Structures are given as C-alpha cells and as structure tokens.
C-alpha cells in the first residue's frame, strides 16, 4: 500500500505542522532519508550490503578479535578497511571513529551533508549519534601500557576516543557543523532513539536537517561481558530458531541525512513516518515477560504515523537470538500485528551491533523498500514452533511500502521506527 496523502493526512496538517494524538505523543512530520550510508561486516556501502542480503551471505566468522579467547562468532570488520581518521582530526583516532569515517565516506553521504551545510548553514544541521561502548577499546589498549605507577600513557585521549560523546563530536567536526549535537547511549536502542531525538529537534525548530545514525565497535569489555552472562552463541546467531543459543556481537555503522523535504535527486522518497519509545521499568537486564514495553513502543510508532498495523508490510525484528528475548518480542509483535505480517531479524548477517543496530537495521528496511524484497534470516534453519510470528527464513521478493524496525535494549529501553515510501 503506497503512502500517500490519504495516509499522511493523519500525520500532519496541510502545512506539515506536527500536532498531538490522543495519547499526547508528538506526531512525527515525515522526515526524508535523503541520503544514507552503511558499513558492517556484511558489506560496506548500500550495494554491497544489499548484495549480501540477497545472496544470504553472512558477515559472521569465528572470533579472532584482539586477545579474546571465546568460543563464539563475531561480525568483525577488516582492519584493512579502517583507515586512520583524517589528519586534521587525528586526536579522534580510534576504532569507533574509524568506522564512523568509513561510513561517512560511502555512497556520496559526505557530499550530501556538505551540500546540506551549504543550503541551511552549519548551525542549522544537528548531529545525533547512538553508541553503546563508543571507543572503550582505546582504554583497554591504553591500560596495557600503564607505567610503573599505574598511570595511563600520556598519549591516551579519553575525551576524543573513549568518551561516549566522542563519536558525535567527531561527526560534527568532520563536517564543520555547529548545530545541536548529542550522543545517545541507551544500549541496543541507542541509534533508533537518535531518530526520535532528531525528529523532536527538527519539530522544535532547532535545526532544519540532521545527521542521524549509530556507530559501535568491538571491544573486549563487550565480548567478555556478554560471555560472562552466558549469552554468546557458539555458532553464528540463529534468531527465532528452535536451537537458538545466543547472540553474535558485531560492529559497524549506519548514517542518514534527515530533512523535512525530499531531495529531488534521490530515486526513492523514503521517509521516517513514526517513532515510538518506551521503558519497561521492569528489570535491569531482562525484558518484561509479556513484552509490554516493546508493545507500547510499536503502538506509539503507529500512532505517531497515523498508520494501522495492517498497513505495515514487513517488520525487522530486534531478534537477538536469545531464547527469552525472541520469545518476548514474539508475544509483543503478535499482540500488535497478529501473526500475518512477515518478520525477520537480520542479525545473522551483521551480528548484534548494539548501539548501531537501530540505524543499521533502519537502513536495511530502507533497502527493503527500495529493492522490493524482504530479507529472510541467515543461519536460522527451523523456526521455533512455539513462536507465533510469520517469521521469514528465506528472502522474499515482494514490494515493501511500509516497514517497521525494532530496537530493544538492555534494561527495557525500547524504540520502534516506521519507514515508508512517500509520493512526492
């Protein structure tokens, strides 16, 4: 079902002014994905990623990261593609910002942002980036080089590498932007929530466009942390599989140039239609057993877009591959959509990229809309019969006009995004 004025009349007034729905949520004015870029172990750039999806080619491999000795698979990006950051920004150089730079240089994204800066002015473009561990690897490496007194080496730069804000600061500096800038760190929902923050800042008139996304990189703290919880899969993760046994950690990034009007140069006018956010307020690490918070996020995304569940063609699930998370998300999605909407998790391709997964998977939804296909679930062999969703194992060639992307983080911090094709 195409998204046209018939649907969008519920979203904005004729002048595009955001309003409020019956729950008090701010209606989201459609914001256009005028340019987007992606980089992960599954592919660098949009075409490479789309080809990996179409060919069911996973980016996961047996863990050989740093000194980790863990029986698991990871979605590690090759060191060979992670060039040092631009010379004038050398103080930001770390693995996390190298991934960010690689992402910014894909598919003409950097040129599009510079054109937007020319159009709006540097102070009118915001930067909103989600990350979980940011550059914590830099501190881990520096810790090995402590002197006899235990002091960290003099060349260690906490503020521009490890610090959570480092990546947003780097992106802002990369483009010479001076508008509002923030990092969002809410575990696995971080970069999905970055879209919500950007939408609110644009609606409030604090910026005209936004560079939005998420970046996260592998580090030993994450690998051993999830390992100590017994959550790492010994094979590539198998979301919704009968024999699923945990997650595969990955790294990567996704960036979107979000604007109020469509760029006439884009082939597809894909837009952010709705955002829903919630908190379980239930447990520090375990999701609400009935998926209450997840359900609220999905319902709010639909409400802010003025779209009925039946209009959604495809759902990209958070789908981590752990037994409890998949079961909880299954309950939540069934409660909102029933069992007829095709769903899948794409973490078998990229691994769980934590703070970056919201942006990466929103861009995968954009690719699904643009390419007219629904990704299946690489590594999943037999769908758990106790789960009720229409879970796709194989890719399906079918037009997608509206897609939902779920990102549910540790501690019950949830975010759902709705994307769709908008007729200009």
Image (cartoon, helix red, strand yellow):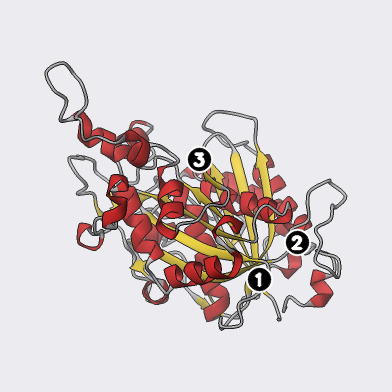
| Residue 305 disc label | 2
Tell me which label, 1 or 3, sits earlier in the chain: 3
Q: Is residue 290 left or right of residue 230?
A: right
Classify the position of the N terminus by image quarter: bottom right
Residue positioned 64% across, 56% down in the render: 207
Residue at figure coordinates x 71%, y 81% from the top left: 423
User: Can residue 343 be spotted in the picture?
Assistant: yes
Q: Is residue 398 above or below residue 417?
A: below
* 142 on left or right of 251: left
Q: CA distance from mark 1 to mark 3?
A: 26 Å
Residue 417 pos. (x, y %):
63, 57
Q: Give the percent coordinates (x, y) of residue 217.
A: 34, 48
SS label for mark 2 = helix
Question: Which residue was labeled with disc 3?
Answer: 185
Q: Earlier in the sequence, mark 2 or mark 1?
A: 2
Identify the residue at the far top of this view. 149
The picture quadrant where one finds residue 210 is bottom right
Give the percent coordinates (x, y) of residue 370. Answer: 55, 78
Is residue 35 rendered to the left or right of residue 9? Answer: left
Q: Nearer the viewer, mark 1 or mark 3?
A: 3
Image coordinates for residue 103, horizontal then vertical, percent: 38, 62
Residue at the image point whose x is 43% and y is 39% from the top: 164
Q: Residues within 10 Å of mark 1 (few under 14, many from 20)?
A: many
Instruction: From the image, tell me which residue sits under label 1.
Output: 420
For mark 3, does the 10 Å Cα neighbourhood hold few (<14), some (14 to 19), or many (20 or more) residues? many
């Amino acid at each position: 079902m195409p998204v046209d004025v018939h649907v969008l009349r519920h979203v904005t007034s004729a002048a595009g002014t955001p309003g409020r729905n019956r729950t008090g949520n701010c209606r989201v004015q459609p914001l256009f994905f005028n340019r987007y870029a992606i980089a992960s172990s599954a592919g660098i750039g949009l075409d490479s990623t789309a080809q990996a999806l179409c060919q069911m080619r996973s980016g996961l491999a047996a863990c050989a990261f740093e000194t980790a000795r863990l029986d698991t698979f990871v979605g590690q990006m090759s060191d060979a593609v992670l060039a040092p950051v631009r010379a004038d920004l050398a103080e930001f150089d770390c693995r996390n910002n190298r991934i960010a730079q690689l992402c910014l240089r894909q598919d003409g994204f950097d040129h599009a942002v510079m054109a937007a800066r020319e159009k709006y002015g540097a102070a009118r473009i915001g930067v909103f980036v989600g990350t979980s561990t940011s550059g914590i690897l830099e501190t881990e490496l520096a810790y090995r080089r402590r002197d006899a007194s235990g002091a960290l080496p003099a060349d260690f730069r906490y503020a521009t590498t490890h610090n959570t804000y480092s990546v947003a600061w780097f992106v802002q500096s990369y483009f010479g932007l001076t508008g509002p800038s923030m990092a969002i760190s809410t575990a696995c929902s971080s970069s999905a929530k970055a879209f919500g923050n950007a939408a609110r800042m644009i609606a409030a008139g604090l910026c005209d466009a936004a560079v939005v996304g998420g970046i996260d990189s592998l580090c030993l703290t994450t690998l051993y942390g999830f390992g100590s919880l017994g959550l790492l899969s010994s094979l590539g993760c198998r979301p919704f599989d009968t024999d699923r046994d945990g997650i595969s950690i990955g790294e990567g990034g996704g960036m979107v140039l979000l604007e109020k009007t469509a760029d006439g140069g884009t082939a597809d006018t894909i837009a952010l239609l709705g955002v829903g956010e919630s908190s379980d307020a239930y447990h520090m690490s375990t999701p609400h057993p009935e998926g209450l918070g997840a359900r609220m996020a999905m319902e709010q995304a639909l409400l802010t877009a003025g779209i009925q569940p039946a209009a959604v063609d495809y759902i990209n699930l958070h789908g981590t591959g752990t037994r409890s998370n998949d079961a909880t998300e299954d309950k939540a999605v069934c409660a909102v959509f029933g069992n007829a909407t095709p769903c899948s998790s794409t973490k078998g391709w990229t691994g769980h990229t934590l703070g970056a997964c919201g942006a990466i998977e929103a861009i995968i939804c954009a690719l699904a809309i643009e390419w007219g296909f629904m990704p299946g679930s690489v590594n999943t062999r037999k769908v758990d019969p106790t789960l009720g969703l229409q879970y796709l194992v194989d890719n399906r060639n079918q037009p997608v006009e509206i897609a939902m992307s779920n990102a549910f983080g540790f501690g019950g911090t949830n975010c759902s995004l709705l994307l769709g094709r908008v007729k200009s």
